[in-house]
Image: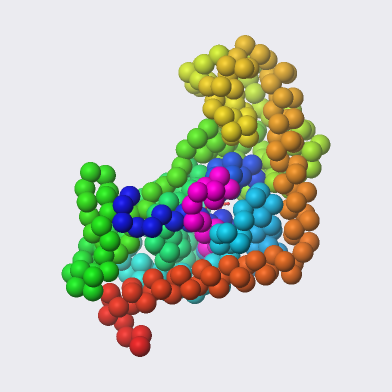
Amino acid sequence: MSGFQELVFSGVQPTGNLHLGNYLGAIKKFVALQDSNDCIYCVVDLHSLTAQLVHDDLAAQTRSITAAFLASGIDPRKHIVFNQSRVMQHAELAWIFNCVARIGWMNRMTQFKDKAGKDRENASLGLLAYPSLMAADILVYRATHVPVGEDQKQHLELTRDIAQKFNNDFSDRIASLGVGVEMKVGDETVNGFFPITEPVIGGPAARIMSLRDGSKKMSKSDPSDLSRINLTDDADTISKKIKKAKTDPDALPGEVDGLKDRPEAENLVGIYAGLADTTKEKVLAEYGGRQFSEFKPALADLAVEKLAPIAGEMRRISADHAYVDSVLRDGGERAGARAEATMKTVREIIGLLDN
Ligand code: AMP
Ligand code: TRP
Protein backbone atom coordinates (compact mmCIF):
# COMPACT_ATOMS: atom_id res chain seq x y z
CA MET A 1 0.00 0.00 0.00
CA SER A 2 1.42 3.36 -0.98
CA GLY A 3 0.62 6.82 0.32
CA PHE A 4 -0.29 6.05 3.89
CA GLN A 5 2.33 5.85 6.58
CA GLU A 6 2.49 2.19 7.62
CA LEU A 7 0.95 1.64 11.03
CA VAL A 8 0.06 -1.58 12.85
CA PHE A 9 -3.02 -1.67 15.11
CA SER A 10 -4.66 -4.51 17.00
CA GLY A 11 -6.94 -5.06 19.96
CA VAL A 12 -7.78 -7.74 22.52
CA GLN A 13 -10.88 -7.85 24.72
CA PRO A 14 -10.45 -7.88 28.50
CA THR A 15 -12.72 -10.85 29.10
CA GLY A 16 -11.44 -14.06 30.64
CA ASN A 17 -7.97 -15.49 30.66
CA LEU A 18 -5.79 -15.32 27.61
CA HIS A 19 -4.97 -18.71 26.11
CA LEU A 20 -2.45 -20.20 23.73
CA GLY A 21 -4.68 -19.34 20.73
CA ASN A 22 -4.62 -15.65 21.63
CA TYR A 23 -0.88 -15.83 22.17
CA LEU A 24 0.09 -17.62 18.95
CA GLY A 25 -2.67 -16.12 16.77
CA ALA A 26 -2.24 -12.54 17.92
CA ILE A 27 0.12 -11.43 20.69
CA LYS A 28 3.23 -13.22 19.41
CA LYS A 29 2.68 -11.44 16.08
CA PHE A 30 2.28 -8.11 17.85
CA VAL A 31 5.71 -8.65 19.39
CA ALA A 32 7.34 -9.65 16.08
CA LEU A 33 5.88 -6.66 14.22
CA GLN A 34 7.17 -4.07 16.66
CA ASP A 35 10.80 -4.37 15.50
CA SER A 36 10.22 -2.69 12.19
CA ASN A 37 6.85 -0.90 12.50
CA ASP A 38 5.05 1.80 14.40
CA CYS A 39 2.46 -0.13 16.49
CA ILE A 40 -0.60 0.61 18.61
CA TYR A 41 -1.99 -2.18 20.81
CA CYS A 42 -5.28 -1.65 22.56
CA VAL A 43 -7.23 -3.40 25.31
CA VAL A 44 -10.73 -3.00 23.90
CA ASP A 45 -12.78 -2.60 27.07
CA LEU A 46 -15.80 -1.04 25.32
CA HIS A 47 -16.09 -4.14 23.13
CA SER A 48 -16.36 -6.33 26.19
CA LEU A 49 -19.65 -4.59 27.12
CA THR A 50 -21.35 -5.83 23.95
CA ALA A 51 -21.99 -9.42 25.07
CA GLN A 52 -22.27 -8.71 28.80
CA LEU A 53 -22.76 -5.28 30.33
CA VAL A 54 -21.91 -6.02 33.95
CA HIS A 55 -18.50 -7.55 34.73
CA ASP A 56 -17.13 -8.58 38.10
CA ASP A 57 -13.94 -6.65 37.71
CA LEU A 58 -13.35 -5.08 34.35
CA ALA A 59 -10.44 -3.02 35.67
CA ALA A 60 -8.61 -6.17 36.82
CA GLN A 61 -9.21 -7.85 33.46
CA THR A 62 -7.94 -4.77 31.64
CA ARG A 63 -4.77 -4.76 33.74
CA SER A 64 -4.30 -8.48 33.18
CA ILE A 65 -4.37 -8.17 29.36
CA THR A 66 -2.02 -5.20 29.59
CA ALA A 67 0.33 -7.29 31.76
CA ALA A 68 0.20 -10.07 29.14
CA PHE A 69 1.20 -7.60 26.41
CA LEU A 70 4.11 -6.31 28.46
CA ALA A 71 5.20 -9.76 29.70
CA SER A 72 5.25 -11.05 26.11
CA GLY A 73 7.69 -8.31 25.19
CA ILE A 74 5.70 -5.37 23.81
CA ASP A 75 7.59 -2.14 24.44
CA PRO A 76 5.11 0.52 25.63
CA ARG A 77 7.62 3.32 25.22
CA LYS A 78 8.51 2.73 21.60
CA HIS A 79 4.92 1.86 20.77
CA ILE A 80 1.51 2.62 22.28
CA VAL A 81 -0.39 0.40 24.73
CA PHE A 82 -3.67 1.73 26.13
CA ASN A 83 -7.29 0.88 26.88
CA GLN A 84 -9.92 1.91 24.36
CA SER A 85 -12.35 3.75 26.67
CA ARG A 86 -9.73 6.39 27.47
CA VAL A 87 -9.82 7.66 23.91
CA MET A 88 -13.39 8.77 23.30
CA GLN A 89 -12.71 9.39 19.61
CA HIS A 90 -13.12 5.60 19.06
CA ALA A 91 -16.77 5.88 20.12
CA GLU A 92 -17.23 9.07 18.11
CA LEU A 93 -15.95 7.53 14.89
CA ALA A 94 -17.93 4.33 15.60
CA TRP A 95 -21.11 6.42 15.62
CA ILE A 96 -20.26 7.86 12.23
CA PHE A 97 -19.48 4.36 10.94
CA ASN A 98 -22.87 3.19 12.27
CA CYS A 99 -24.31 5.62 9.78
CA VAL A 100 -21.98 4.45 6.97
CA ALA A 101 -22.42 0.69 7.45
CA ARG A 102 -25.68 -1.09 6.53
CA ILE A 103 -27.68 -3.30 8.89
CA GLY A 104 -27.46 -6.11 6.32
CA TRP A 105 -23.65 -6.07 6.56
CA MET A 106 -23.82 -6.50 10.32
CA ASN A 107 -26.47 -9.23 10.15
CA ARG A 108 -24.15 -11.33 8.00
CA MET A 109 -21.32 -11.45 10.56
CA THR A 110 -20.77 -15.02 11.74
CA GLN A 111 -19.48 -13.84 15.12
CA PHE A 112 -22.74 -11.92 15.67
CA LYS A 113 -24.79 -14.96 14.68
CA ASP A 114 -22.80 -17.21 17.03
CA LYS A 115 -22.86 -14.84 19.97
CA ALA A 116 -26.48 -13.76 19.57
CA GLY A 117 -27.64 -17.37 19.28
CA LYS A 118 -31.28 -18.12 18.56
CA ASP A 119 -32.75 -15.09 20.28
CA ARG A 120 -31.31 -12.39 18.03
CA GLU A 121 -33.99 -9.85 18.85
CA ASN A 122 -32.76 -9.89 22.40
CA ALA A 123 -29.04 -9.33 21.66
CA SER A 124 -27.70 -5.89 22.50
CA LEU A 125 -27.56 -3.31 19.76
CA GLY A 126 -23.88 -3.01 20.70
CA LEU A 127 -23.29 -6.66 19.76
CA LEU A 128 -24.71 -5.99 16.30
CA ALA A 129 -22.65 -2.80 15.91
CA TYR A 130 -19.46 -4.45 17.29
CA PRO A 131 -17.66 -4.47 13.90
CA SER A 132 -18.34 -0.78 13.45
CA LEU A 133 -16.48 0.02 16.68
CA MET A 134 -13.70 -2.32 15.57
CA ALA A 135 -13.41 -0.46 12.26
CA ALA A 136 -13.27 2.80 14.22
CA ASP A 137 -10.46 1.44 16.47
CA ILE A 138 -8.37 0.79 13.39
CA LEU A 139 -9.28 3.73 11.19
CA VAL A 140 -9.16 6.46 13.84
CA TYR A 141 -5.37 5.97 13.50
CA ARG A 142 -5.62 5.31 9.77
CA ALA A 143 -3.79 2.03 10.49
CA THR A 144 -2.64 0.03 7.46
CA HIS A 145 -1.95 -3.42 8.97
CA VAL A 146 -3.93 -5.44 11.52
CA PRO A 147 -2.51 -8.69 12.98
CA VAL A 148 -5.28 -11.01 14.23
CA GLY A 149 -6.29 -14.68 14.32
CA GLU A 150 -8.25 -16.24 11.48
CA ASP A 151 -11.60 -15.71 13.27
CA GLN A 152 -11.35 -11.93 12.77
CA LYS A 153 -11.00 -12.08 9.00
CA GLN A 154 -14.64 -11.28 8.28
CA HIS A 155 -14.57 -8.26 10.61
CA LEU A 156 -11.53 -6.91 8.78
CA GLU A 157 -13.26 -7.32 5.43
CA LEU A 158 -16.10 -5.24 6.84
CA THR A 159 -13.59 -2.62 8.00
CA ARG A 160 -12.38 -2.39 4.39
CA ASP A 161 -15.97 -2.04 3.17
CA ILE A 162 -16.66 0.77 5.64
CA ALA A 163 -13.48 2.64 4.65
CA GLN A 164 -14.32 2.25 0.99
CA LYS A 165 -17.90 3.45 1.39
CA PHE A 166 -16.81 6.46 3.45
CA ASN A 167 -14.16 7.30 0.83
CA ASN A 168 -16.77 7.03 -1.95
CA ASP A 169 -19.62 8.80 -0.19
CA PHE A 170 -17.39 11.76 0.65
CA SER A 171 -15.10 11.68 -2.37
CA ASP A 172 -15.96 15.22 -3.49
CA ARG A 173 -15.35 16.76 -0.09
CA ILE A 174 -12.18 14.73 0.44
CA ALA A 175 -10.93 16.06 -2.90
CA SER A 176 -11.95 19.67 -2.31
CA LEU A 177 -10.33 19.69 1.14
CA GLY A 178 -7.24 18.03 -0.35
CA VAL A 179 -7.11 15.41 2.42
CA GLY A 180 -7.15 12.29 0.23
CA VAL A 181 -4.23 9.91 -0.06
CA GLU A 182 -3.45 7.76 -3.11
CA MET A 183 -3.24 4.06 -2.45
CA LYS A 184 -3.08 0.86 -4.38
CA VAL A 185 -5.87 -1.62 -3.75
CA GLY A 186 -5.24 -4.77 -5.75
CA ASP A 187 -4.35 -3.52 -9.23
CA GLU A 188 -6.22 -0.25 -8.88
CA THR A 189 -4.96 3.10 -7.64
CA VAL A 190 -7.63 4.85 -5.58
CA ASN A 191 -7.79 8.01 -3.54
CA GLY A 192 -9.39 8.22 -0.12
CA PHE A 193 -9.15 9.52 3.41
CA PHE A 194 -9.15 6.10 5.08
CA PRO A 195 -6.70 3.36 4.07
CA ILE A 196 -8.01 -0.01 2.92
CA THR A 197 -6.46 -1.99 5.75
CA GLU A 198 -4.48 -5.18 5.17
CA PRO A 199 -5.14 -8.10 7.53
CA VAL A 200 -2.03 -9.83 8.87
CA ILE A 201 -3.29 -13.40 9.31
CA GLY A 202 -1.51 -16.63 8.65
CA GLY A 203 1.35 -18.90 9.63
CA PRO A 204 0.92 -22.28 11.27
CA ALA A 205 -1.04 -20.93 14.26
CA ALA A 206 -3.71 -18.59 12.85
CA ARG A 207 -6.40 -20.91 14.19
CA ILE A 208 -5.52 -23.00 17.23
CA MET A 209 -8.08 -25.67 18.07
CA SER A 210 -9.29 -27.11 21.38
CA LEU A 211 -6.99 -29.76 22.90
CA ARG A 212 -10.06 -31.93 23.52
CA ASP A 213 -11.75 -31.59 20.12
CA GLY A 214 -9.90 -30.73 16.91
CA SER A 215 -13.05 -29.39 15.28
CA LYS A 216 -13.60 -26.62 17.85
CA LYS A 217 -11.59 -23.42 18.21
CA MET A 218 -9.55 -23.05 21.40
CA SER A 219 -11.66 -20.57 23.30
CA LYS A 220 -12.01 -18.94 26.69
CA SER A 221 -15.68 -19.87 26.75
CA ASP A 222 -15.10 -23.64 26.51
CA PRO A 223 -16.34 -25.14 29.81
CA SER A 224 -13.40 -27.59 29.94
CA ASP A 225 -10.18 -26.03 31.20
CA LEU A 226 -8.34 -29.02 29.69
CA SER A 227 -9.33 -27.73 26.24
CA ARG A 228 -6.93 -24.80 26.44
CA ILE A 229 -3.58 -23.70 27.78
CA ASN A 230 -3.99 -20.46 29.68
CA LEU A 231 -1.17 -17.95 29.63
CA THR A 232 -1.27 -18.06 33.44
CA ASP A 233 -0.87 -21.88 33.68
CA ASP A 234 2.20 -23.13 35.54
CA ALA A 235 4.68 -25.61 34.07
CA ASP A 236 3.00 -28.73 35.53
CA THR A 237 -0.42 -27.69 34.27
CA ILE A 238 0.91 -26.99 30.77
CA SER A 239 2.59 -30.42 30.61
CA LYS A 240 -0.44 -32.22 31.98
CA LYS A 241 -2.80 -30.59 29.45
CA ILE A 242 -0.56 -31.45 26.51
CA LYS A 243 -0.15 -35.04 27.65
CA LYS A 244 -3.94 -35.36 28.00
CA ALA A 245 -4.61 -33.74 24.61
CA LYS A 246 -6.79 -35.85 22.32
CA THR A 247 -4.91 -37.60 19.50
CA ASP A 248 -5.40 -40.49 17.11
CA PRO A 249 -3.49 -43.79 17.34
CA ASP A 250 -1.26 -43.29 14.25
CA ALA A 251 2.30 -42.05 14.06
CA LEU A 252 2.96 -38.53 12.72
CA PRO A 253 3.16 -38.33 8.91
CA GLY A 254 6.30 -37.15 7.13
CA GLU A 255 4.43 -34.55 5.03
CA VAL A 256 1.78 -31.89 5.68
CA ASP A 257 -0.61 -33.64 3.28
CA GLY A 258 -0.72 -36.55 5.70
CA LEU A 259 -2.36 -34.30 8.32
CA LYS A 260 -5.57 -34.11 6.28
CA ASP A 261 -8.53 -35.47 8.24
CA ARG A 262 -6.38 -35.64 11.36
CA PRO A 263 -7.42 -32.36 13.04
CA GLU A 264 -5.95 -33.14 16.46
CA ALA A 265 -2.58 -34.13 14.99
CA GLU A 266 -2.59 -31.07 12.74
CA ASN A 267 -3.36 -28.81 15.71
CA LEU A 268 -0.49 -30.13 17.84
CA VAL A 269 1.93 -29.83 14.93
CA GLY A 270 0.71 -26.26 14.34
CA ILE A 271 1.20 -25.40 18.01
CA TYR A 272 4.73 -26.81 17.90
CA ALA A 273 5.53 -24.82 14.75
CA GLY A 274 4.03 -21.63 16.21
CA LEU A 275 5.98 -21.92 19.45
CA ALA A 276 9.24 -22.81 17.69
CA ASP A 277 8.83 -20.13 14.99
CA THR A 278 9.03 -22.69 12.24
CA THR A 279 6.70 -24.38 9.76
CA LYS A 280 4.59 -27.53 9.95
CA GLU A 281 6.77 -28.98 7.16
CA LYS A 282 9.90 -28.61 9.25
CA VAL A 283 8.26 -30.06 12.35
CA LEU A 284 7.19 -33.11 10.33
CA ALA A 285 10.62 -33.43 8.76
CA GLU A 286 11.89 -33.93 12.30
CA TYR A 287 9.03 -35.89 13.88
CA GLY A 288 7.48 -37.75 10.91
CA GLY A 289 7.14 -41.46 11.74
CA ARG A 290 7.25 -40.89 15.50
CA GLN A 291 4.41 -41.69 17.89
CA PHE A 292 2.56 -39.14 20.01
CA SER A 293 4.15 -40.78 23.05
CA GLU A 294 7.41 -39.21 21.81
CA PHE A 295 6.05 -36.02 20.26
CA LYS A 296 3.89 -34.91 23.20
CA PRO A 297 6.73 -34.73 25.76
CA ALA A 298 8.81 -32.72 23.26
CA LEU A 299 5.88 -30.35 22.69
CA ALA A 300 5.27 -30.08 26.45
CA ASP A 301 8.93 -29.14 27.04
CA LEU A 302 8.82 -26.54 24.30
CA ALA A 303 5.55 -25.04 25.58
CA VAL A 304 6.88 -24.81 29.12
CA GLU A 305 10.13 -23.25 27.91
CA LYS A 306 8.27 -20.58 25.92
CA LEU A 307 5.21 -19.94 28.11
CA ALA A 308 6.27 -20.38 31.75
CA PRO A 309 8.52 -17.26 31.73
CA ILE A 310 5.63 -15.20 30.33
CA ALA A 311 3.32 -16.45 33.10
CA GLY A 312 5.92 -15.46 35.71
CA GLU A 313 6.38 -11.98 34.24
CA MET A 314 2.61 -11.55 33.97
CA ARG A 315 2.19 -12.29 37.67
CA ARG A 316 4.95 -9.84 38.58
CA ILE A 317 3.66 -7.04 36.34
CA SER A 318 -0.02 -7.59 37.25
CA ALA A 319 0.79 -7.03 40.90
CA ASP A 320 2.18 -3.57 40.14
CA HIS A 321 -1.06 -1.66 39.50
CA ALA A 322 0.64 1.71 39.60
CA TYR A 323 3.00 0.71 36.81
CA VAL A 324 0.33 -0.88 34.61
CA ASP A 325 -1.97 2.11 35.08
CA SER A 326 0.81 4.54 34.21
CA VAL A 327 1.48 2.65 30.95
CA LEU A 328 -2.21 2.87 30.02
CA ARG A 329 -2.47 6.54 30.99
CA ASP A 330 0.60 7.51 29.00
CA GLY A 331 -0.46 5.36 26.03
CA GLY A 332 -3.95 6.87 26.18
CA GLU A 333 -2.56 10.39 25.98
CA ARG A 334 -0.39 9.62 22.98
CA ALA A 335 -3.15 7.66 21.22
CA GLY A 336 -5.66 10.40 22.00
CA ALA A 337 -3.56 13.07 20.30
CA ARG A 338 -3.32 10.99 17.12
CA ALA A 339 -7.01 10.07 17.17
CA GLU A 340 -8.04 13.70 17.61
CA ALA A 341 -5.97 14.74 14.60
CA THR A 342 -7.91 12.25 12.45
CA MET A 343 -11.27 13.27 13.91
CA LYS A 344 -10.69 16.97 13.25
CA THR A 345 -10.47 16.17 9.55
CA VAL A 346 -13.36 13.69 9.69
CA ARG A 347 -15.61 16.37 11.25
CA GLU A 348 -14.53 18.76 8.53
CA ILE A 349 -15.21 16.22 5.77
CA ILE A 350 -18.70 15.57 7.13
CA GLY A 351 -19.48 19.20 7.87
CA LEU A 352 -19.85 19.00 11.64
CA LEU A 353 -19.04 22.37 13.22
CA ASP A 354 -16.23 22.00 15.68
CA ASN A 355 -14.51 25.39 15.89
P1 AMP B 1 -10.25 -12.21 21.71
O1 AMP B 1 -9.78 -12.78 22.98
O2 AMP B 1 -11.44 -12.91 21.13
O3 AMP B 1 -10.37 -10.70 21.78
O4 AMP B 1 -9.11 -12.51 20.66
C1 AMP B 1 -7.87 -11.84 20.67
C2 AMP B 1 -7.04 -12.26 19.49
O5 AMP B 1 -6.72 -13.66 19.56
C3 AMP B 1 -7.74 -12.06 18.14
O6 AMP B 1 -6.79 -11.59 17.20
C4 AMP B 1 -8.20 -13.44 17.77
O7 AMP B 1 -8.30 -13.63 16.37
C5 AMP B 1 -7.08 -14.30 18.35
N1 AMP B 1 -7.56 -15.67 18.66
C6 AMP B 1 -8.57 -16.00 19.52
N2 AMP B 1 -8.73 -17.34 19.58
C7 AMP B 1 -7.81 -17.87 18.71
C8 AMP B 1 -7.47 -19.22 18.33
N3 AMP B 1 -8.11 -20.27 18.84
N4 AMP B 1 -6.47 -19.38 17.43
C9 AMP B 1 -5.80 -18.31 16.92
N5 AMP B 1 -6.07 -17.03 17.24
C10 AMP B 1 -7.06 -16.81 18.14
N1 TRP C 1 -12.73 -8.22 17.60
C1 TRP C 1 -11.41 -8.53 18.09
C2 TRP C 1 -11.47 -9.89 18.78
O1 TRP C 1 -12.47 -10.31 19.30
C3 TRP C 1 -10.90 -7.50 19.05
C4 TRP C 1 -10.73 -6.16 18.41
C5 TRP C 1 -11.47 -5.04 18.68
C6 TRP C 1 -9.78 -5.81 17.41
N2 TRP C 1 -11.01 -4.00 17.93
C7 TRP C 1 -9.99 -4.43 17.13
C8 TRP C 1 -8.79 -6.53 16.74
C9 TRP C 1 -9.24 -3.77 16.17
C10 TRP C 1 -8.05 -5.85 15.77
C11 TRP C 1 -8.26 -4.48 15.50
O2 TRP C 1 -10.48 -10.54 18.85
Which residue occupies 55% across, 36% down? Answer: 205
Residue found at the very far bottom of the displayed protein: 355
Which residue occupies 38% across, 49% down? Answer: 198
Numbered disc total = 0
Residue found at the very far right of the displayed protein: 236
Q: Nearer the viewer, residue 153 or 186?
A: 186
Image spot of residue 335 (x, y percent) = 51, 68
Give the left or right position of residue 157, taking residue 120 as reference: left
Image spot of residue 258 (x, y percent) = 51, 16
Image spot of residue 320 (x, y percent) = 77, 64
Q: Is residue 44 magenta?
A: yes
Can you say whether 309 is above or below 2 in the image?
above
The quarter holding residue 62 reads bottom right
Residue 43 can be seen, yes or no? no
Q: Is residue 301 magenta?
A: no
Q: Which residues are magenta?
A: 31-48
